Amino acid sequence: MTLRLENVMGCATGSGKGPTSIQVVMVYNPNCSKNAYKTRDGYIKSDVRRWMDDLAWMISAWSRSCKFEWTPPLKVLISGTFKDKRACPDVHNFIIVIADAIQEGLGINDRDYAIETVLPNIDPTVEPRIAITITQAK
């Protein structure tokens, strides 16, 4: 799958002795919510599948390029930046889609994740986005 720059906005790693975390910033897709990610037939919508594939690819590619081996448990932090309160979703509604994408990218079952969400930021000057930070738990 080819990673499209319009879907992934940035990627950053931890510093110090070696990488212990990754942060991927993805374009906000309202269909990734647990309330909208499946069709009436129970299948994952195609735009959501592409978003998940892009997230999984970024995590997998970063891990391979840094030769970093993830081991359970992992900490996952989900946050978001949106233009205003009116357009701001419940960030916790993205947990299912994000956890499944991380599981696909790392090959680690999502039952081994400690997932946390934080209050979204409001910034009218940026495009809406979701930031996912994965940290190796000690």
Image (cartoon, helix red, strand yellow):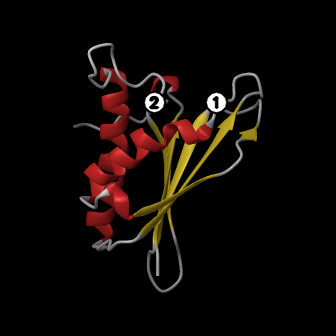
In the rendered structure, which amino acid carries the disc numbered 1?
A: Pro
Vertical position of residue 90 compared to residue 78: above or below: above
Q: Which mark is residue 89?
A: 1
**Which quarter of the figure has residue 122?**
top right
Which amino acid lies under the numbered mark 2 shown in the image of this protein?
Cys
Provide the residue designation for mark 2. Answer: 32
Residue drawn at the location 69% of the way across and 29% of the way down: 88
Percent from the top left, x then y, of residue 16? 53, 82
Identify the residue shown where x is 50% and y is 27%: 29
The x and y percentages for residue 40 are 32, 13
Residue density around tag 2, few if under 14, some if 14–19, many if 20 or more, within 10 Å: many
> Does 48 sit above or below residue 19?
above
Name the element at disc 2: helix
Mark 1 surroundings within 10 Å by alpha-carbon count, few (fewer than 14), some (14 through 19), many (20 or more): some
Residue 96 in the image: state x and y as whole percent.
42, 41
Report the front residue among 12 and 22.
Answer: 22
